[in-house]
């Protein structure tokens, strides 16, 4: 699994946790995950284990695709990079998004 896909899963988990409006401590308590583990995942310092992903899915009654829908057998590394960029942009304020668009237009 390439680095972009690993980062994307970490970001998806972080974004999901933030969408619950729970602190890391409360989120981890419900999912029975160590807070240090979650911090490492959210900061892309470590990749979540299968057990950790399953714990989150089970604790929050998630459809697995909520976290994993970007993993497809026919995706290329470029697709993963595109998805990673989109995941980062989701959290940016509109002003930053506008600057990114302006920069991309200049780079054409």
Image (cartoon, grey):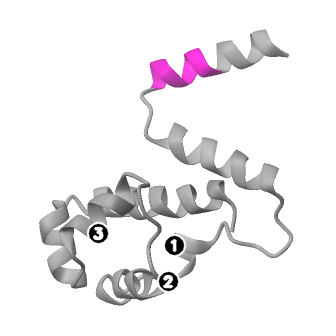
Asked if the residues shown at circle 3 and circle 2 are in contact, with their CB atoms under 8 angstroms apart, the answer is no
Q: Is residue 89 above or below residue 104?
A: below
The residue lying at 38 percent from left, 82 percent from top is 52
- The residue carrying mark 2 is 63
Closer to the chain start, of discs 1 and 3, is 3
Residue 95 forms part of the magenta stretch: yes
For image coordinates 19% across by 68% down, the residue present is 35
Q: CA distance from mark 1 to mark 3?
A: 20 Å
35 or 71, nearer to the observer: 35
Q: Residue at x 43, y 63 (%)?
A: 46
Q: Secondary structure at mark 1?
A: helix
Magenta-drawn segment: 94-100
Side of 91 where 98 appears, left or right: right
Residue 27's disc is none
Residue on which disc 1 sits: 66
Residue 104 in the image: x percent, y percent?
Answer: 73, 19
In the rendered structure, which disc, 3 or 2, sits on the residue that comes first in sequence?
3
- Neighbourhood count class around disc 1 (C-alpha, 10 Å): few under 14, some 14–19, many 20 upward: few
Question: Please, which residue is most extreme toward the top here?
Answer: 106
- Count every numbered label the image shows and give the total: 3
Give the residue number, with chain letter if any, for mark 3.
37
The nearer-to-camera label among 3 and 2 is 3
- In this view of the protein, which residue sits in the foreground, 31 or 34? 34
* Tags 1 and 2 touching, CB below 8 Å: yes
Q: Whole-Å distance between the Cαs marked 3 and 2? A: 22 Å
Give neighbour class at mark 3: few <14, some 14-19, many 20+ (Cα, 10 Å).
some
């Amino acid at each position: 699994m390439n680095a972009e896909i690993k980062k994307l899963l970490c970001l998806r988990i972080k974004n999901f946790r933030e969408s619950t409006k729970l602190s890391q401590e409360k989120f981890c308590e419900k999912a029975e995950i160590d807070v240090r583990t979650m911090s490492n995942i959210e900061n892309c310092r470590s990749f979540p284990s299968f057990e950790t992903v399953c714990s989150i899915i089970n604790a929050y009654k998630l459809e697995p695709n909520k976290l994993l829908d970007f993993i497809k057998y026919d995706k290329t590394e470029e697709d993963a990079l595109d998805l990673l960029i989109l995941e980062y942009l989701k959290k940016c304020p509109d002003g930053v998004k506008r600057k990114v668009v302006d920069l991309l237009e200049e780079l054409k």
